[in-house]
Each structure stands twice: as C-alpha cells, then as structure tokens.
Image (tube, grey):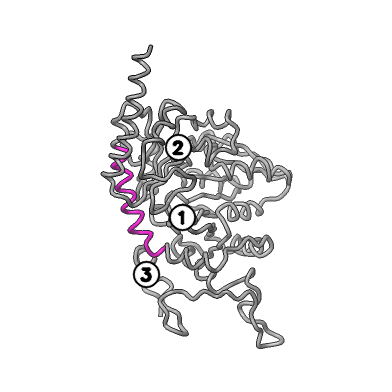
Amino acid sequence: MSKKPFSLQTSLIHSRGFDKETGAVSTPIHHATTFHQQDFDQYGTYDYSRSGNPTRETVEETIAELERGVRGFAFSSGMAAISTSFLLLSSGDHVLVSEEVYGGTYRMITEVLTKFDIEYSFVNMKDLHEVACAIKHNTKVIYMETPSNPLLNITDIEGVVKLAKANDCLTFLDNTFMTPLLQRPISLGVDVVLHSATKFLAGHSDVLAGLAVTGDEEIAGKLAFLQNSFGAVLGVQDCWLLLRGLKTLHVRLKESSESAYKIASFLEGRKEVEEVYYPGLSYHPGREIQVRQAEGPGAVLSFRLKGEEEVKQLIKHVNIPVFAVSLGAVESILSYPSRMSHASMPKAERERRGITDGLLRLSVGLENADELIKDLQKGLDSIQQINRSNVINL
C-alpha cells in the first residue's frame, strides 16, 4: 500500500512515523559504532557506523523526501557536505561558481581544489549570458548559491540548468537560505542540493551539520562511496537534534520570514541605510525570478551603512540580535560579513562583489518583530546623533 502523499508541513513531523520495535515517536539514538553480524556469509544492513547508522539514515531519508530526491547524505558540517561533493571532480576539470558565494566555499575552491589541479572561474550568475560565455570545454560543475550570501542576489535556476545540460555539466546548489520548504531545486533540474543544516534546518544554534541530496541514482552511488571513503559523517546525537529541529521548521521559517519583511520595509525608510537587500521587496532586481522558482523570500536580509564606524555604532546600541556568525536560528543574528562569513575572501575581492565594510547581514529569528524594529531604530538613531555631533564640531 503506497504512503499517502503529505504536505511538507505534515511530512516534517510524520514522515518517519514511529519506531517499529517500541512505538517511540522520537527516533532512537543508536550510539553503536559496530553491529553484530548473525550470518557468516551475508552481513546485515549495518556493519560499521561510518558506513551506515540507523539514526543517521533517518536524517538522510528525511532530507531526501523533503527535497524530492532519491537519496540524502548527512555530514559533520555544511563544508564537509560541499567538500565531499566537490570530490566528484577530477584533475583537469573546471568548476564555474557564482561570484558571490559563502566565504568557506570560496576558500575551498581557491585554496584546496587548486591543489588537485581543478580549475575554477567566478561569474556573475545573475546574467545567463555571462554564465554561458564562461563555460569551458572542461567545465564539469556549475555551482549556484541563490539567494546568494550575503547580498541576496537571485540566480535563474532553470536557466542555468539548461546551460549545464547543454554542455554536459552537473549543477550544485546551496539551498541553505531557502530550505526545501521555500525552494526545491531538484524539481528544477539541479543535480546536487547542499545545505548547511546548522542553520534553518536545525534552527537552534546547537548543531553543526551538513546535508547533500541528489535526484540521480548514479550520482547517489558516487556520493555514497565518497561519504564512506572521506568519512566526515554526522554523529548520531547531532542527527537526533537535527531531526527534532526539523519538526518545527515550518512554523519557525514562516514567522521569521514575516518578521524579515517588516524589518526590511522599516530599514528601507531610514536615511542611515544606503541599501537594503531582500528578495521580498518590490524593487529587488531578482524578485520576479524568486517568485517564479521559490515560495517566499526567506528570513535573511542585508543592509548597507556608510562604513565601519557606523556599523560599530549600531552594534554598540542594539540589544536583541546577537552579534555573531551563522544564521537561521531562533534568535536573530546580526553578522558582519567582511570580518565573519567572508573574512577568508581577500578585501579587494569582497569589495568588488559589494561586500563592503558597511554591510551587515541580519538573520531574523522568532523575537517580536516590533521589538526588533525598535531595537534597530535605537541603533540607527545613535548613528544619526553621531553624525549631527560631527557636523556641529566641524
């Protein structure tokens, strides 16, 4: 009897059902690293926990179902998932990458892949013509991040997929900002979907995890081999915490996204703010594409102040958001990309991409939106007061 197709909202809670042996509604944590084999000639499903573990398998089946893929893989971090996926490349291959990409991914591509004679090019992936012109004879992977980190630029996923297929390339896409609730890249033709599950999927700033999903059986077989060989798998305790976080993803993301829109609308009306970057705003250049390929703008926005001194002043006067790296948690997180997420990117490269010393990224959490706005207002007012004082002193 086929399983009734549930909505993603319901699947987040009930997709795994209950434990068949005990009836437990919470997935058991199997701390075992090795498993007794009852048959000398034929081993069971599990033999060694790096190769497979029942708790981790539940995570992997869950993300595969949510992303509409054939198989999922759980790793010890988002970068472990990305790095292992890049092992699908070989010496002499070329990877084409969105120029505005997470700093850790930038570091992996520019400082690690090059050691294995893998070439790379960064391209403005908002422009399909530029993407098409940048594809080489040895391009094997086109790597997307949409919305991008930290300027929330939008890539036309289906457009890039068509170019990739025409040139016999694989497509990778970092779906961390959107999650499968808002964007399902496999249904748009993407080959490998990646997540820093540390962020929205786990959602509580207490789990370090990465996920990869594919809708292709052949790629799944290769990723399974690489996961087992490389060994950067997710521990069972973190698997359980991730599963628990997933159950509330729908309500968390809905609430945070609604608050993000309110805050973005507030910020665009402040003269201290030079620019606001959020796909939910009507003037965002990628909004039309975002509406077509996703089910919402998400809960992350960025905004630009004049410079570092203004950033320092704001940080000094806001109390609710934590000033920290990461995103996607129940608490709002205010980040400074030039010294945090993109610190590994050379200053000239950051500035060329628009990641200036005045840029802040805000991941909106579950606090009261009006209180968050008042808090930010206080910080922006302090900048205004400093500017007035400077004018008077002149």
Q: Residue at x 34, y 50 (%)?
A: 256
Residue drawn at point x = 63 percent, y = 45 percent: 108
Indicate which label's residue lies in the foreground, 3 or 1.
1
Overall secondary structure of the magenta stretch? helix
Horizontal and vertical percent for residue 91? 73, 47
Quadrant containing the C terminus in the rendered view: top left
Q: Nearer the viewer, residue 389 or 119?
A: 389
Mark 2 burial class by Cα count in 10 Å: few <14, some 14-19, many 20+? many
- Distance CA(mark 3)–CA(mark 2): 36 Å
Q: Look at the picture and state if 377 lies above or below 370.
A: above
Q: Mark on residue 151?
A: 2
162 in magenta: no
The numbered mark at residue 205 is 1
- The Cα–Cα distance between marks 2 and 1, rounded to whole angstroms, is 22 Å
Please identify the quarter of the rendering in which residue 132 is found. top right
The answer, for residue 292, to whether it is visible in the render is no
Q: Nearer the viewer, mark 3 or mark 2?
A: 2
- Three-letter residue code for mark 2: Leu
| SS of the residue under disc 1 | loop
Which residues are drawn in magenta?
246-265
Q: Position of residue 181 (x, y in %)?
A: 39, 56
Image position of 154 with respect to 239: above or below: above
Residue 120, quarter of picture:
top right
Q: Mark 3 and mark 1 in contact? Answer it, CB < 8 Å.
A: no
